[in-house]
Image (spheres, rainbow, N blue to C red):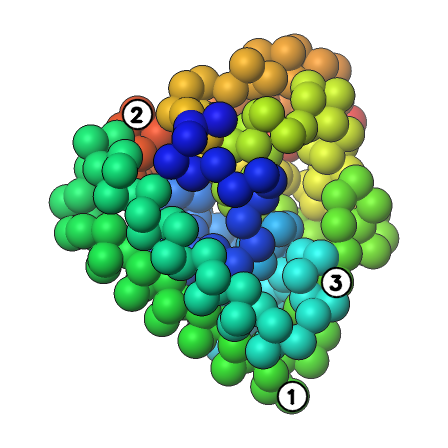
Amino acid sequence: MSSEFDFGGAVPAWGRSAAEYEAFFALSDVPSSARVLDCGGGPSSFAAEWGGTGRFVVAVDPVYRFSGRIIEVDFESTSARMLKGAREAYARFIWDHYGSPESVVRLRRDVLSTFLRDFRSAVANGRYVAGHLPDLPFRARSFDLVLCSHLLFLYSEEFDTETHISYLRELLRVGREVRVYPLLDMAGNRSRHLDGTIRTMQETADIEVVAVPFEFRRGDTNMLRLTKNR
């Protein structure tokens, strides 16, 4: 794992916006009627923003068992380390969109604020479900589209190939289509689990690596799309 961002595991306090999801998941083709699951998004504001427009979006993550205050405190301790890491690894990123490491942290704080308002709101009742892979608390085919952001393949040191396969099988159990981003590991290299995972999953799903209109880490321009074929 890249030493600049070695946190000893996944970082649950670091969320993304709907605009970022729309870019790195290429969501322009998703109809407004689609039932969408955001799996492992933590304090991302995607569910709040899309749900606020009347779309059906559910987010599932283990962190939702905690209070908003605990999630907020965890963000503050994480943000300083992320800022330090981004500064040290500055050359590994393309800064055209975000501008600077400091701007990224400000955006993440804005995302957190949007998430917390929704998370604490009665309007969002049922939108945030505490759960974890590979045993999601949903019936088969509950969703048209499942999104998994910055978890699989990114944490290639933490999750082996078999774990990636079991997680993707569970995502395909609850959704007809699955999109995963990114496909590079924490060091910015193509995940060593990607090819083996694709070979195994091709037995039950149509799979393609899709170029997306987003690049922050250099070369991180593809997502994985899986669709059930049986």
Mark 2: which secondary structure?
Answer: loop
Q: Residue at x 56, y 18 (%)?
A: 194
Is tag 1's residue or tag 2's residue first in the polypeptide sequence? 1
Tell me how far mark 3 sits from mark 1, CA to CA: 16 Å
Residue to which mark 3 is pinned: 130
Q: Write the residue at 42% across / 28% down.
A: 2
Q: Look at label 1 and name its amino acid.
A: Ala
Residue 85 percent coordinates (x, y): 34, 42
Whether residue 162 sits left or right of residue 217 in the image: it is: right
Q: Nearer the viewer, residue 163 or 211?
A: 163
Whether residue 53 is visible to the viewer of this picture, yes or no, is no
Residue 152: x and y in percent read 59, 34
**Quick check: 136 above or below 124?**
above
**Amino acid on which the number 3 mark rests in the picture:** Ala
Residue situated in front as seen by the camera: 196 or 108? 108
| Marks 1,2: beta carbons within 8 A | no
Residue 81 in view (yes/no): yes
The residue indicated by pointer 1 is 122
Q: Label 2, on which residue? A: 219
Instruction: Residue type at mark 2: give it.
Output: Gly
As drawn, is 62 to the left or to the right of 21?
right
Residue displayed at 29% across by 43% down:
86
Q: Residue at x 76, y 56 (%)?
A: 131
